[in-house]
Amino acid sequence: MKLYVASSWRNDRHPSVVAALRQSGHEVYDFRNPMECDNGFHWSEIDPEWREWTPEEFRRGLSDPIARRGFETDWKAMQRADACVLVMPCGRSAHLEAGWFVGAGRPLLILLSDGEPELMYAMASRIYVTLDEMVNNLGRYEHTYPGSGLLRERIV
């Protein structure tokens, strides 16, 4: 299965998730290393002071050729993937990516961490508590449409 792993640069679990999924025989997109000799997109490539940007500067930054290249690389990988693995904790971009998969009718698999519950995670096809649980059960379900996740199973 072709998997798009959505997470955060700050998530220490991300590399072990990518490695475990690859060892299980899946083709995995890693935004931290999308291609050989490419360590992924970093806002600091555009401006070392990016954290201090105003909303106007942020909007302009999205149009920078470096940002466009980073976006296109991730976007193409999303379009090629069969499913998304959302590795918690993560931020806004990963949640936008996960939402796109649900809207596109592709499975969303969530690997939870400690933290606040989120109602909309009921859209997921499956929610896993441990990496082993995910790796051992990946692909053992039928996904038919967005919203066919946990909540749908309990309602039907």
Image (cartoon, rainbow, N blue to C red):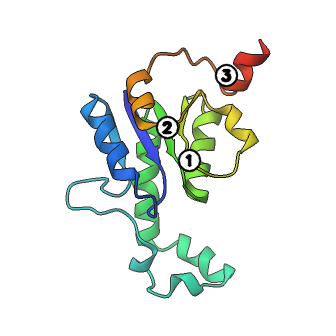
First in sequence: mark 2 vs mark 1: 2
- Label 2 close to label 1 by CB (< 8 Å): yes
Q: Residues within 10 Å of mark 3 (few under 14, many from 20)?
A: many
Q: Which residue is mark 3?
A: 148
Question: Amino acid under label 3?
Answer: Ser
Disc 1, SS: helix
x 69%, y 51%: residue: 116
Disc 3, SS: loop
Disc 2, SS: strand
- Label 2 close to label 3 by CB (< 8 Å): no
Residue 57 left/right relative to 42: right
Note whether 73 is above or below 67 in the view shown.
above
Residue situated in front as seen by the camera: 57 or 50: 50
The disc at residue 97 is 1
Distance in Å between CA atoms under marks 2 and 3? 15 Å
Note whether 87 is above or below 21 in the view shown.
below
Residue farthest toward the top in the current orientation of the protein: 156
The disc at residue 129 is none
Q: Which residue is mark 2?
A: 84
Residue farthest toward the right in the current orientation of the protein: 155
Question: Which quadrant of the view contains residue 105?
Answer: top right
